[in-house]
Image: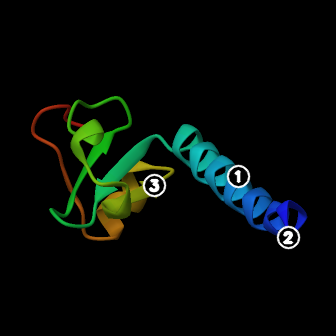
Amino acid sequence: MRLKRLPTLLLAALLLITVAAAALASSYIGNSNTGKFHYSDCRWVSKMYDSHKVYFDSRQEAVSAGYVSCKVCRP
């Protein structure tokens, strides 16, 4: 019975690793709920729901997607 759950647990772990790697590689994180983007170390990023986080590799990419910069961290 435990062996049947193993593939599901491995897939879940792989998904978490992928999301964590994307977060570390991205310099900017947008909030799909507010339409603002932040530096990854901005205090507002920790207050976002994970489901609202959008990862960008560059400032221009975030601006092109219609996001505006945070007034606190000023990316």
Q: Which residue carries the number 1 mark?
A: 13
Identify the residue position indicated by label 2 in the image.
4
Residue at image coords 46%, 40%: 27
Mark 3 touching mark 1, by CB under 8 A? no
Say what amino acid the circle numbered 3 marks: Phe
Q: Residue 56 — which label?
A: 3
The amino acid type of the residue labelled 1 equals Ala
User: Residue sitting at 85 percent across and 70 percent down?
Assistant: 4
Q: Residue at x 25, y 49 (%)?
A: 48
Q: Quadrant of the N terminus?
A: bottom right
Structural crowding at the residue carrying mark 3, measured as other residues with C-alpha within 10 Å and reported as few (<14), some (14–19) or many (≥20): many
Spatial CA span between label 1 and label 2: 16 Å
Relative to 24, 54 lies left or right: left
Find residue 8 and report its image quarter.
Answer: bottom right
Locate residue 59 relative to residue 49 in the image: left or right. Answer: right
C-alpha distance separating marks 3 and 1: 23 Å
| 37 vs 49, nearest the viewer | 49
